[in-house]
């Protein structure tokens, strides 16, 4: 096994709602290697964010609950940790960046105070050293005049700049892992390109591993080395980035890629759409959750849950049907 | 005027006053739309793209007089909309409809599908009783909604289905022009293609003309015949979809294109990105001369002094930039 940093095994998370229990994550296992950029791709409700929030102990209980699974980081199971311990991990070992920087920051505290908060909790640095580190981090993420801007409040920054500040805050304790949950979804494309370049640059400088959660198959193509595709709270395909785009094997991945317009091609091609809707899982799925929308469905799909099978170099897919032949494997 | 032209907008300006103090006196203006001209031919789709705050939505809304322009002319057929009185405008307004971005906010939660789709017909006294009923079924059929949904409320539908309800309502008055204001950006990836295909089919079937407002350049390229690119209240480039994407002339369009991710890792690795520095300036105090000059890699002295006009560089390809050599393309 190559240098594994984080290893999630059979994770299950559900939420109690007035309409019934929603099974958001239904047995997810994945590995993150040192220095790797891993993309987790899926539509809303597929369980991609909940998986990572569960690992970090950020699922509010109630209504949510992690019902099964393990998540090993440096030999320790994160899911068994006490609040105090997991908080230390969140501050200094695993940094997290969220989609909407404006709701994440406290509007009445200065940026300087908020960026240095992880340091105050876990490192005994002098005031000056703390401030110097904050200035250094803001400079690193490309905030102009960082020492003056420490005194500013979140609303005085633009969306792109706030996202940079959030990245600075996530990285200030030099974490081993950065989890980015749709960090550019709320931003314009030109600003998105800035942030993606910044994160790549920081990865080269600081060497942390990155998990980038997104619904955007275009964005992740140029960023990740390996991609995990989720649907219905399950991993349905995982592969190295080139293999996934060259030879997608799960009908859902194939459909998703065919439904995207390409900027570099003419406009006469009709987009192939995936009919139907993603499921809301009031029951834990016992057969393939995609089968009702699937064009390649066979009888077995509605009866048995396909497990991930290895079909190439680190390429695994959870489907009964081989898309090349249209028949069962 | 050219018989083929359905809508012609000339030098449109929409300013929003900034009010301060106890007496709410006007202290400045947000120049949301600052002199925009374009025309749309019958049966054509004109894409209007730009980043948030560039004025694309305000332009669309001004055509329906949701925002009152302070200057400019809007010709619909041979009628000038802004000089019409309320009664006359109301008659024409039937022929221009809008589809909104957020299918969660744009439908009245207390109205059933029947009421939502039937309301415009009742308001204009076009149908009642059994006629009305038949029309509602007809439009639901056109947008691909089963008629068994007719007495349900919006919260019972998914985002894609709600957007279909919104489209059915817009179609109910048999319009010529539909202003589509980011109709797919709130939807999941696999649903976006469904809605775009629906809009394309309806256009063919009902001979509709679209003004398609969006920030997703790949989707705009896919659906539009011609595309106008906006930046800070002005159109910087306007060309046929193919010309614009194959040979973008304006430095902003070039940067915007290069920022759009392409869902193919091999293409992504070879791309040379032009990353714009900084953010879009405030529209309440736009830069003098060319609005883009503060972020433009080519900016020269003249750009600060004189505002470039939208000039025809080659047949049907317009750009507003001092730095483009005239007539040698």
Image (spheres, rainbow, N blue to C red):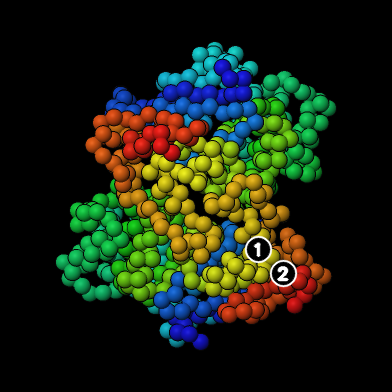
Is disc 2 in contact with disc 1, using a CB cutoff of under 8 Å?
A: yes
- Label annotation for residue A323: 2
> Pointer 1: what residue?
A254
The numbered disc on residue A309 is none
Q: Position of residue A304 (x, y in %)?
A: 76, 75
Looking at the image, which residue is at 46% across and 49% down? B257
Q: Nearer the viewer, residue A60 or B184?
A: B184
Q: Secondary structure at mark 2?
A: loop
Residue B57 in view (yes/no): no
In this rendering, would B26 be left or right of B110?
A: left
Disc 1 residue crowd, few under 14, some 14–19, many 20+, Cα 10 Å: some
Q: Earlier in the sequence, mark 2 or mark 1?
A: 1
Q: Secondary structure at mark 1?
A: helix
Percent x, y for residue A163?
Answer: 37, 56
User: Marks 2 and 1, how far apart in space?
Assistant: 9 Å
Query: Image height check: is B162 above or below B7?
Result: below
Q: Position of residue B102 (x, y in %)?
A: 56, 42
Callouts 2 and 1 on one subunit: yes
Residue A3 quadrant: bottom left
Please determine whether, in this image, residue B329 is positioned above or below residue A255: above
- Does residue B71 appear in this view? yes
Quarter of the image with the C terminus of chain A in it: bottom right
Q: Callout 2 environment at 10 Å: few (<14), some (14 to 19), or many (20+)? A: some
Q: Report the side of B38 relative to A328 (left or right).
A: left
Count of numbered badges drawn on the protein: 2
Q: Residue, x 69% and y 26% (percent of image)?
A: B173
């Amino acid at each position: 096994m190559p240098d594994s940093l984080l290893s999630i095994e059979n994770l299950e998370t559900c939420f109690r709602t007035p309409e019934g229990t929603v099974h958001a994550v239904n047995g997810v296992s994945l590995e993150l290697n040192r220095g790797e950029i891993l993309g987790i791709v899926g539509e809303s409700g597929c369980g991609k964010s909940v998986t990572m929030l569960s690992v970090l102990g950020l699922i509010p209980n109630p209504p949510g609950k992690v019902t099964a699974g393990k998540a090993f980081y440096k030999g320790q199971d994160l899911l068994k940790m006490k609040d105090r311990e997991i908080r230390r991990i969140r501050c200094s070992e695993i940094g997290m960046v969220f989609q909407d920087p404006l709701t994440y920051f406290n509007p009445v505290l200065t940026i300087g105070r908020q960026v240095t908060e992880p340091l105050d909790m876990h490192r005994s640095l002098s005031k000056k050293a703390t401030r110097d580190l904050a200035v250094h981090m803001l400079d690193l993420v490309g905030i102009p005049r960082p020492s003056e801007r420490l005194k500013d409040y979140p609303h005085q920054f633009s969306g792109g700049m706030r996202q940079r500040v959030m990245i600075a805050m996530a990285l200030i304790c030099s974490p081993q892992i950065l989890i980015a949950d749709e960090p550019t979804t709320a931003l314009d494309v030109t600003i998105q390109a800035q942030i993606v370049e910044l994160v790549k640059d920081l990865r080269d400088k600081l060497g942390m591993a990155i998990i980038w959660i997104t619904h955007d198959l275009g964005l992740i193509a140029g960023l990740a080395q390996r991609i995990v595709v989720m649907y219905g709270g399950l991993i349905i395909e995982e592969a190295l980035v080139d293999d996934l785009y060259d030879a997608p094997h799960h009908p859902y991945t194939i459909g998703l890629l065919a439904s995207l317009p390409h900027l570099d091609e003419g406009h006469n091609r009709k987009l192939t759409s995936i009919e139907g809707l993603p499921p809301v899982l009031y029951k834990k799925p016992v057969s393939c959750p995609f089968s009702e929308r699937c064009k390649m469905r066979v009888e077995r799909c509605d009866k048995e849950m396909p497990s991930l099978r290895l079909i190439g170099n680190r390429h695994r897919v959870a489907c009964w049907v081989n898309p090349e032949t249209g028949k069962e494997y | 005027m050219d018989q083929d032209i359905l809508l012609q907008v000339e030098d449109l300006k929409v300013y929003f006053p900034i009010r301060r103090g106890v007496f709410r006196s006007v202290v400045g203006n947000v120049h949301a739309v600052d002199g925009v001209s374009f025309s749309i031919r019958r049966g054509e789709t004109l894409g209007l793209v730009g980043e948030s705050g560039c004025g694309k939505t305000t332009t669309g809304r001004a055509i329906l007089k949701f925002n009152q322009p302070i200057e400019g002319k809007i010709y619909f057929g041979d009628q000038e909309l802004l000089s019409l009185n309320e009664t006359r405008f109301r008659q024409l307004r039937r022929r221009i409809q809008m589809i909104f971005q957020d299918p969660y906010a744009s439908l009245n939660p207390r109205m059933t599908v029947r009421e939502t789709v039937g309301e415009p017909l009742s308001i204009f006294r076009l149908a009642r009783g059994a006629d009305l009923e038949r029309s509602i079924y007809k439009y639901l059929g056109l947008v691909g909604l089963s008629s068994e949904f007719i007495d349900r409320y919006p919260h019972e539908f998914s985002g894609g289905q709600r957007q279909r309800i919104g489209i059915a309502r817009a179609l109910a008055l048999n319009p010529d022009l539909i202003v589509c204001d980011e109709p797919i950006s709130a939807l999941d990836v696999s649903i976006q293609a469904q809605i775009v295909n629906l809009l394309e089919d309806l256009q063919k079937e009902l001979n509709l003309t679209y003004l398609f407002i969006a920030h997703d350049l790949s989707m705009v390229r896919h659906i539009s015949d011609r595309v106008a690119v906006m930046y800070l209240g002005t159109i910087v480039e306007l060309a046929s979809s193919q010309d614009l994407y194959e040979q973008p002339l304006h430095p902003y369009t070039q940067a915007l294109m290069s920022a759009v991710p392409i869902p193919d890792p091999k293409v992504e690795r070879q791309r040379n990105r032009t990353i714009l520095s900084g953010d879009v300036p405030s529209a309440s105090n736009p830069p003098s001369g060319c609005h883009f000059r503060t972020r433009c890699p080519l900016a020269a002295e003249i750009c600060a002094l004189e505002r470039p006009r939208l000039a025809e560089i080659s047949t049907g390809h317009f750009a507003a930039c001092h730095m483009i050599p005239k007539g040698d393309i």
